[in-house]
Amino acid sequence: MTGHLLTHHNVADRGFTPLKITVAPNGARRGRKDHQKLPIAIDEIAVTAKQCADAGADEIHLHVRDAQGMHSLDSGLYREAIAAIAQTSPDMTVQITTEAAGVFSVTQQLEVLECLRPRAASVSVREIARDIDLAPRLYGVAREADIAVQHILYDPSDAALLAEWQAEGFIAQEGCEVLLVLGRYAPPEVARVEDLFAFVSAVAPLCESWTVCAFGKTEHAVACAAMQMGGHVRIGFENNLCRPDGTLAEDNAENIRRTVSAASAMGRSLLKKASTT
């Protein structure tokens, strides 16, 4: 299976849905010391959104920072950032993060969804499991507010937890979207293409759509494998700062362009083109 997927370059005849490309330009932890073009301020994020939309990204995975440059779930900052992105990139979907990052409680994650009611949000099942009593309420709020939730899964055990919650009825299987995270920020662990296949097998019965993100310079290789399997991709400095050869990428948009080129080369149709025809 693995060899077949990695050597079958043209997927035009497989009937896959058009590829959605999400950019994750900054994340919760990295800063200017990691890359001079990692966007921190809201105006920088808005400029990056425009650059990445022009390069081919459909969506931005949004993190905001406080005045000290630290990860924040502040609704006011989110509103300001969403408005700024709407000015530079009006057709780009904005997905906010609810990431705890070792700082925020499930109560605070719930509060940002209740207060902001965004169009889309990513939610880690592992983080929400820290307060199992609040979990049904959080997902209920998302459902009532029509928030498109992307369930973040770090390994197959998270997929088992998602399956359990689907069986209990507070996460719907219909329309379920997941993000598969390969590799780790800390301790550093570079993503491995071979880990993708078992992960996808574990989640396929649980969801209608899956996306992958990958830590380290193997991000592009993992993205190519995912595209060949019918998945979607999240690309950006949150997970990887480099080109496939390990040198620093110029900016987020460079790696988006590389992804678009790879998708086109393998015959995978693009959501951006499909939505404008």
Image (cartoon, helix red, strand yellow):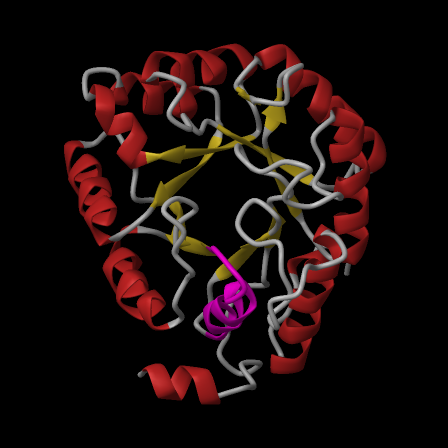
What percent of the width, then of the height, locates residue 247? 66, 65
Q: Which residues are magenta?
A: 214-228
> Is any part of residue 37 visible from this angle?
yes
Residue positioned 82% across, 38% down in the render: 47
Instruction: For the N terminus, give its image quadrant.
Output: bottom left
In the figure, is residue 230 to the left or right of 39? left
Q: Is residue 226 part of the magenta span, yes or no? A: yes
What secondary structure is the stretch in magenta mostly built from?
helix
Foreground residue among 156 and 277: 156
Residue positioned 50% across, 59% down in the render: 216
What percent of the width, then of the height, locates residue 147? 49, 28
Q: Is residue 239 above or below residue 227?
A: above
Foreground residue among 238 and 54: 238
Instruction: For the C terminus, give its image quadrant.
Output: bottom right
In the figure, is residue 50 to the left or right of 216? right
Foreground residue among 130 and 93: 130
What percent of the width, then of the height, locates residue 69? 63, 22
Residue positioned 39% across, 67% down in the render: 192
Q: Is residue 19 part of the magenta span, yes or no? A: no
Q: Is residue 219 above or below residue 152?
A: below
Q: Quadrant of residue 88?
A: top right
How many numbered marks have been drawn onto this rendered protein structure?
0
Q: Is residue 263 above or below residue 134?
A: below
> Is any part of residue 274 visible from this angle?
no
Residue positioned 63% across, 44% down in the render: 34
In the figure, is residue 237 to the left or right of 251? left
What percent of the width, then of the height, locates residue 142? 42, 24
